[in-house]
Amino acid sequence: MISEKYLIPTNHSLVRFLLVGLVNTGIGLAIMFLLLNVVGASYWVSTFTGNAIGACVSFLLNRAFTFKSTVSYHKGLSRFIIVILLCYFSSYFLSGKMGEWISQYFIISPEMAKNVSVLLGSVFYTISNYLGQKYFVFTNKIG
């Protein structure tokens, strides 16, 4: 039997958010890299599609498990979409620019720079998305 001191504490919303994030990020990144590297889709199509599918999983799990919110689906979903879109465009725009900068100053291929951009974007997206969901989407103050 595993001692409780070795278990991940799930009493904090950030820990639960990260656990849910592992699931939806894994799904989203797999789709992004598949579209980008196998299908040959563009950076924007790949990242948008992967994030859209991950977002569906995220909304349901974060509402019920992470934030244990009673916010109505109507209000929560509309705010969720706003946060997701803002986080997506700002995070992947910034990471795309950083990828361009990296490819100019370091010896890596443009394809590798795109992959680095996707990974950086997912980090920026995760941080901004958590804050938006916690303080704007799933706060029970909005009913």
Image (cartoon, grey):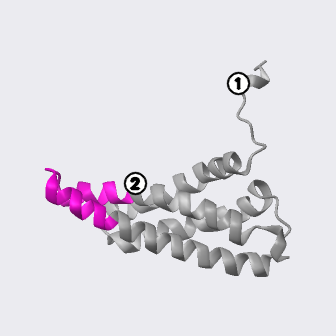
From the viewer's side, name the closer residue of 137 and 33: 137
The residue that appears at 68% across and 45% down in the rendered structure is 15
In this picture, residue 54 sits left or right of residue 49: right
Which kind of residue does numbered mark 2 sit on?
Leu
* 7 w.r.t. 69: above or below: above
Span shown in magenta: 96-119
Residue at which label 1 appears: 6
Residue at which label 2 appears: 119
Q: Is residue 114 a member of the stretch shown in magenta?
A: yes
**Residue 92 in view, yes or no:** yes
Q: Residues within 10 Å of mark 1 (few under 14, many from 20)?
A: few
From the viewer's side, name the closer residue of 53 and 143: 143
The residue that appears at 42% across and 60% down in the rendered structure is 121
Q: How far, Cα to Cα, is label 2 from label 1?
A: 29 Å
Image coordinates of residue 84 in percent, x first then y, are 57, 72
Image coordinates of residue 110 in percent, x first then y, are 19, 60
Q: Quadrant of residue 10?
A: top right
Say which quadrant the C terminus sits in: bottom right
- Evaluate if marks 2 and 1 touch, with contact meaning CB atoms under 8 Å apart: no
Image coordinates of residue 73 in percent, x first then y, are 79, 76
